[in-house]
Amino acid sequence: MGKKGIVVATTVVAVMTVIFGVIGAVFLGLRRYEDDRDDRSVCKYARSPATACGVVAAVLALTTQILASVAIGCCGAWQNPKRANRVAAVVFYVISWILAIIAVLLFLGGALLGIEGYKEKTIGKTIENGSCVGGVGGEGVFVDAIFLFLVVVALEVSSYLLIQKDDHHQAAASDNPPSIPTATSPLATTATSKDDAYASAPAPENQV
């Protein structure tokens, strides 16, 4: 798979990460409390499909970061950076890894919130007329994870473009090396002919 193929694969996986994150947030937002007939002091909430969505989103987010690192060239592409573009690319790359790990943890946190559980009944919040009401919540974790993941993608794109721009400049410089006069160049020929003319000219006679 060439670099273009890796870039396309990274884009597809990134889009899928956002899609699963949004689906997970929707499932958590739609989850409601249920009455527990065995214990009237607590409200029960069932397991949500958001658990599976969170796990898949976390795996896809990590996969996106790995593929992006391969497309950028990992740390090997920045050995002995001499241009400001490469230095900025390294900084963006390192920050993207830190934020990507946090985003993965947030997706996993959202997955944990999708597990079934119980909550004590409190008047005015989870109970009304003796019945459990309202949503369980937790979709904010998915929202934060998606936002952070989009920041990671922006950093990855910036790092990739900076590396490509720097490589383009270096390739252009190598294709057009500075002209240095050589023995066969016109400039060197002119200089040699002038030296020969002075050398062949008769030496002036001694004047008394």
Image (cartoon, grey):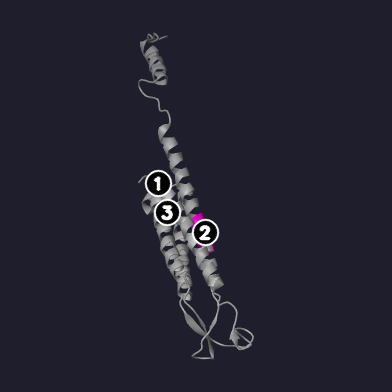
Q: Is residue 177 left or right of residue 133?
A: left
Quadrant where the C terminus sits is top left
User: Could you tell which of marks 1 and 2 lies nearer the N-terminus?
Assistant: 1
Query: What crowding class fits label 1: few (fewer than 14 Cα within 10 Å), some (14-19), or many (20 or more)?
Result: few
User: Could you tell which of marks 3 and 1 lies nearer the N-terminus?
Assistant: 1
Decide: is 32 above or below 57: below
Residue that numbered label 2 is attached to: 150
Callout 3, which amino acid? Ala
Numbered mark located on residue 68 in the image: 3
Numbered mark located on residue 5 in the image: 1
Q: Is residue 122 left or right of residue 56?
A: right
Eye-nearest disc, 3 or 1? 1
Taking the spot 54% from the left edge, 63% from the top edge, the residue there is 147
User: Is 148 covered by the magenta stretch?
Assistant: yes
- Segment colored magenta: 147-154
Q: Please provide percent x and percent y for residue 25.
A: 53, 68
Q: Please provide percent x and percent y for residue 168.
A: 45, 40
Q: Is residue 91 visible?
A: no
User: Could you tell which of marks 3 and 2 lies nearer the N-terminus?
Assistant: 3
Taking the spot 48% from the left edge, 75% from the top edge, the residue there is 113
Q: Please provide percent x and percent y for residue 152.
A: 49, 59
Q: Are marks 1 and 2 in contact (CB under 8 Å)?
A: no
- As drawn, the residue found furthest toward the front would be 37
Residue 143, quarter of picture: bottom right
Callout 1, which amino acid? Gly
Asked which secondary structure carries label 3, the reply is helix
Callout 2, which amino acid? Leu
